[in-house]
C-alpha cells in the first residue's frame, strides 16, 4: 500500500473544519505543518499560533511569516497565552505522554464544538523512530497512552489514521456537540 504525504489528512480536511467551526489555529512543533496551517489561516482569516522550543524552527517560521510564534517549552507557553478559542490544531512537539496529556487538556478546554485537534505519533513508537534530538530528556514514544485515554472519553470522538504522517499514527480528536447526540441512553 502506498504511503500518503505527511499532512495530507489535514490538507484535505482543513477547509471542511474551518468552514464549519469558528476559532483560531495552533500547532506545537513547527515544520512542514506550519506551511499547511499558514495557508488555511490566510484563506479563512484566522490567527495561527505556533509553539516550539527550537530556536532554528522559530527563526524559520518568522521568515515564513503569517504566524504568531512562541519560542519556549509548550507547557511554559500555555501559561502565558491569552484566553482563545481554537477550531483546529496539531500536537507534534515532545513525544512523551506526560507532556502531551497536559498539552491536550489545555487545548481541548479551548477547542470549539466540532473543532479538531490532530495528534501525531499516537502509535507506540520504536526506539529507532524515537532516536532523535527531541528526546534527550528521558522516556518517549508513549503518546499512545494519551490517545487511549481520549478514546475512552465519551465527550470526544477520535479516529487514528495509520497510513499517513510517516506511519507514526495521526489521531483526530473532535469535541462532540452535546446538543446533537447520536446515541440513545
Ligand atoms: C517532530 S518536530 C515537528 C514537526 C513539524 N510539525 C513538521 O510538520 O515538520 C517536533 C518539534 O517540537 C519541538 N518540541 C519538542 N518538545 C517541545 C516542547 N516541550 N515544547 C515546544 N516544542 C517542543 C522541537 O523543537 C521540534 O521542532
Image (spheres, rainbow, N blue to C red):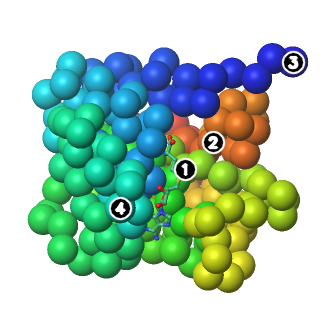
Do tag 1 and tag 2 residues touch (Cβ < 8 Å)? yes
Do tag 2 and tag 3 residues touch (Cβ < 8 Å)? no
Q: Earlier in the sequence, mark 2 or mark 3?
A: 3
Q: How far apart are marks 4 and 1 (CA)?
A: 22 Å
The residue at label 4 has a CB less than 8 Å from ligand 1:
no
Question: In this view of the protein, which residue sits in the foreground, 109 or 126?
Answer: 126
Q: Which residue is drawn at 59% across and 66% down?
A: 134
State the image coordinates of residue 123 (x, y, percent, origin top left): 75, 53
43 in relation to 114, above or below: above
Residue identified by numbered label 1 = 119
Instruction: Assess disc 3: are there few (<14), some (14-19) or many (≥20) residues with their C-alpha within 10 Å of its C-alpha.
Output: few
Q: Residue 55 carries which label?
A: 4
Q: Earlier in the sequence, mark 4 or mark 1?
A: 4
State the image coordinates of residue 128 (x, y, percent, origin top left): 84, 58
Do tag 4 and tag 1 residues touch (Cβ < 8 Å)? no
**157 left or right, relative to 174:** right
Q: Note whether residue 124 is visible.
A: no
| SS category of the residue bearing label 3 | loop
Do tag 2 and tag 4 residues touch (Cβ < 8 Å)? no
Q: Which residue is drawn at 64% across and 71% down?
A: 135
Q: Which of marks 3 and 4 is nearer the N terminus?
A: 3
| SS category of the residue bearing label 4 | helix
Amino acid at each position: 500500500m502506498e504511503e500518503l504525504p505527511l499532512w495530507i489528512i489535514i490538507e484535505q480536511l482543513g477547509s471542511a473544519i474551518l468552514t464549519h467551526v469558528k476559532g483560531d489555529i495552533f500547532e506545537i512543533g513547527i515544520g512542514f505543518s506550519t506551511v499547511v496551517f499558514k495557508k488555511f489561516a490566510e484563506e479563512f482569516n484566522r490567527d495561527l499560533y505556533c509553539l516550539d522550543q527550537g530556536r532554528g524552527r522559530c527563526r524559520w517560521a518568522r521568515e515564513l511569516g503569517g504566524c504568531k510564534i512562541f519560542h519556549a517549552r509548550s507547557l511554559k507557553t500555555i501559561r502565558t497565552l491569552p484566553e482563545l478559542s481554537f477550531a483546529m490544531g496539531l500536537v507534534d512537539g515532545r513525544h512523551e505522554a506526560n507532556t502531551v496529556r497536559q498539552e491536550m487538556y489545555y487545548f481541548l478546554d479551548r477547542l470549539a464544538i466540532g473543532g479538531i485537534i490532530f495528534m501525531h505519533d499516537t502509535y507506540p513508537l520504536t526506539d529507532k523512530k524515537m532516536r532523535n534530538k527531541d528526546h534527550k530528556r528521558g522516556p518517549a514514544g508513549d503518546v499512545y497512552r494519551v490517545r487511549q485515554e481520549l478514546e475512552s472519553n465519551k465527550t470526544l470522538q477520535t479516529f487514528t489514521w495509520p497510513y499517513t504522517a510517516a506511519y507514526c499514527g495521526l489521531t483526530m480528536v473532535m469535541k462532540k456537540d452535546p446538543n446533537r447526540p447520536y446515541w440513545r441512553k
